[in-house]
Amino acid sequence: MKVTKAVIPAAGIGSRFLPWTKAMPKEMLPIVNKPVIQYVVEECVTAGIEQIIVVTSWQKRAIEDHFDYLPELEWRLKQQGKTEALKEVRRLAEMASFVFVRQKGPYGNATPVLSAKKAVGDEPFAVLFGDQFVWAKPPALSQLLEVAEKKETAAVAAVRLPKERLSAYGVCQGKQLEEGVWQLEKIVEKPQPEEAPSDLVAYGSYVFTPDIFEILEGLKPGKGGELWLVDAISQLCKKRRVLAVEIKNGRYYDAGNKLSYHQTVVDFMLQDPEIGQKMRDYLKKKVRG
């Protein structure tokens, strides 16, 4: 089994960041000098993904523009002798083959995956959300694909979180098959810490086989009247083997809420070779008062 396509849902309205996201997609919020979704796309490309299917909505044109050629910008950069900047903006359009699909259907994070059915076709594919990622070495998707392709089955990436944080996430329930790999029985959504079946959280990176679409087409609305991917995964576990793969040496970043987003920005600023030390010195001064 070889996975060469990835679906990135990016149709949400970003209500937690209003009014910032009134005219700008939440996936385009910057982390230092790159938008969140670029980190996700770069992870896909590093893992060997050749075609990226981005599921958008009417207000997400900026995402398409970001991964397209912009002749006027390129001309200006060339005229100004900014060769490195020119290489970078061209690289964005050349990283992969991009397909943009408009989301159709009810609310819920299962809907954009179903909207990508025709573009995916009859082959396995990855799903990564456009506002969250795990920074890992090797990249999280590479670790996930290594197991999914070898075992020739669907798989869910998982990270361990402290007990007190489990109530905000989908927690994996299953049995361990080998070091770092579990056979998933279901995902328990936002359990109370004392009721959580494990400390493994499904964080938002998946590999699916095409039979997930049949489940998605018959999926009934769940919490809030929305279609939830976690419900489809639990059904898939009853039909075929689904694995949970613990991501090693990784840190989970969720840019979908204000606190986590700004924590992500600070972390990446501190790692930046150009401004990292200056930012560190600045924060030390602020902490001292």
Image (tube, grey):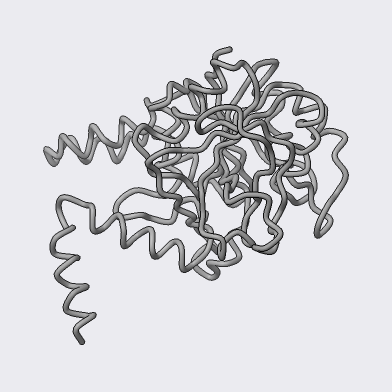
Q: Residue furthest bottom?
A: 289
Quadrant that contains the C terminus: bottom left
Residue 160 in percent (x, y) is at 51, 49
**Residue 7, located in which quarter of the rendered image?**
top right
Residue 87 in percent (x, y) is at 23, 32
Question: Is 280 drawn above or below residue 200 in the view shown?
Answer: below
What residue is rendered at 51% in x and 54% in y? 161
**Residue 56, located in which quarter of the rendered image?**
top right
What residue is rendered at 51% in x and 59% in y? 162
Tell whether 105 sits left or right of 124. Answer: right
Residue 287 or 109: which is nearer the viewer?
287
Residue 204 in view of the camera: yes
Question: Is 100 drawn above or below residue 240 in the view shown?
Answer: below
What residue is rendered at 53% in x and 70% in y? 19
Residue 189 or 70: which is nearer the viewer?
189
Tell whether 287 sits left or right of 164. Answer: left
Residue 92 in percent (x, y) is at 36, 33
Residue 94 in percent (x, y) is at 37, 25
Residue 58 or 276: which is nearer the viewer?
276
Count of labels in the image: 0
Quadrant that contains the N terminus: top right
Question: Is 219 drawn above or below residue 199 in the view shown?
Answer: above
What residue is rendered at 34% in x and 48% in y? 34
Residue 128 in view of the camera: no
Tell whether 258 sits left or right of 222. Answer: left
